[in-house]
Image (spheres, grey):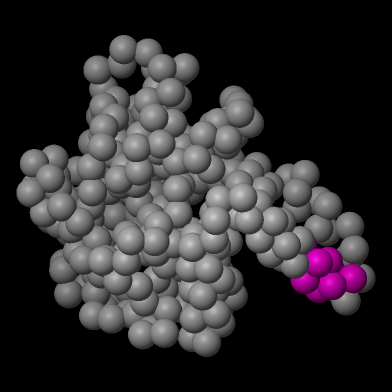
């Protein structure tokens, strides 16, 4: 199974965004309200009021926000990430909110490592939001994530939407950012971040709602508890980068015994499509 060839990347590509550095900055704005929003997003997409006693695997745990949300909803949580900085972020959130909690383990690991994934066992909820498309081998990563879903369990993933030529253009932007000298990266980031907002302002003005852009910045934490600026940094810098059309994801997961239970698309635009699949007993 291949994504758009123009937007695909190679697992051998040594150009990689330092996601952990961005998440370390995000930790400074994590508060009780953001944690509650993260909990609400899990409840809504999974269709569960709580996760009491469920085994929850967070693949590519990033900041650790959703591992924390799952733990507070009652799950027994296993969190891992390929990026050492992300592992450190998640460990810090565990220290802040769940110090010495035996029901939440955090460590390094790769979803592409077959033996590592097998060693973890199976889970009632396998969660990987906006991660698998950054591994450099998205379909292999999805294969391994799917194999970790227990009978009767759920797979909750979010993958970038395939926009064809536009996705290929974004791939070049991301690759260029990661190949720049460190001193030039902030300038590049600001330029594209500003371009993002100018484009959004143009759309808002055309719709007669110029204040919508400012409102989005003010209320962005209501979207999964996230931060608008840190998401922009992730969007411009996040590489490797692959994309998928929803029907390709449906076919891939159905062939592996998973049935679609919930779907939230980005409306064919930039962004991620969210999927929840279930493995029937």
Examine the rendered structure and indicate whether residue 181 appears above or below residue 221. below
With 96 as the anchor, is 226 left or right in this view? right
Q: Is residue 38 left or right of residue 4?
A: right
Name the residue at 49% across, 73% down: 171
Quadrant where the N terminus sits is: bottom left
Give above or below for 138 relative to 65.
below
- Residue 175 on image: x %, y %: 48, 68
* Residue at the image point whose x is 58% and y is 40% from the top: 225
Residue drawn 41% across the image and 84% down it: 6
Please say if 153 is above or below 267: above
Magenta residue check for 251: no
Secondary structure that dominates the magenta span:
helix
Q: Residue 274: x and y, percent?
A: 44, 62
The residue shown at (11%, 54%) is 114
Stretch of the chain drawn in magenta? 197-205
Rendered image quadrant of residue 97: top left
Quadrant assignment, res 200: bottom right
| Quarter in which the C terminus is drawn | bottom left
Residue at the outermost top position? 100
Where does residue 144 sit, x and y in percent of width and height? 18, 58
Residue 162 visible in the shown view: yes
């Amino acid at each position: 199974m291949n994504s758009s060839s123009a937007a695909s990347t190679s697992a051998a590509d040594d150009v990689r965004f330092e996601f952990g550095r961005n998440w370390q900055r995000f930790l400074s704005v994590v508060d009780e309200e953001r944690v509650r929003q993260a909990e609400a997003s899990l409840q809504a997409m999974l269709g569960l009021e709580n996760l009491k006693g469920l085994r929850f695997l967070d693949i590519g745990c990033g900041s650790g926000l959703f591992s924390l949300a799952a733990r507070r909803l009652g799950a027994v949580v296993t969190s891992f990430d390929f990026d050492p900085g992300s592992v450190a972020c998640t460990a810090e959130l565990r220290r802040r909110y769940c110090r010495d909690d035996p029901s939440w383990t955090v460590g390094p690991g790769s979803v592409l490592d077959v033996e590592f994934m097998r060693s973890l066992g199976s889970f009632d909820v396998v969660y990987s939001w906006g991660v698998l498309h950054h591994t450099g081998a998205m379909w292999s990563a999805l294969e391994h994530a799917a194999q970790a879903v227990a009978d009767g369990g759920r797979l909750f993933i979010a993958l970038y939407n395939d926009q064809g030529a536009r996705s290929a253009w974004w791939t070049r932007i991301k690759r260029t950012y990661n190949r720049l000298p460190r001193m030039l990266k902030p300038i590049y980031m600001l330029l594209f971040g500003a371009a993002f907002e100018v484009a959004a302002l143009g759309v808002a003005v055309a719709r007669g709602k110029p204040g919508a852009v400012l409102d989005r910045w003010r209320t962005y934490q209501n979207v999964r508890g996230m931060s608008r600026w840190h998401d922009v940094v992730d969007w411009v810098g996040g590489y490797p980068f692959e994309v998928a059309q929803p029907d390709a994801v449906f076919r891939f997961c159905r062939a592996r015994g998973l049935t679609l239970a919930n779907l939230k698309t980005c409306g064919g635009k930039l962004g991620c499509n969210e999927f929840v699949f279930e493995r029937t007993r």
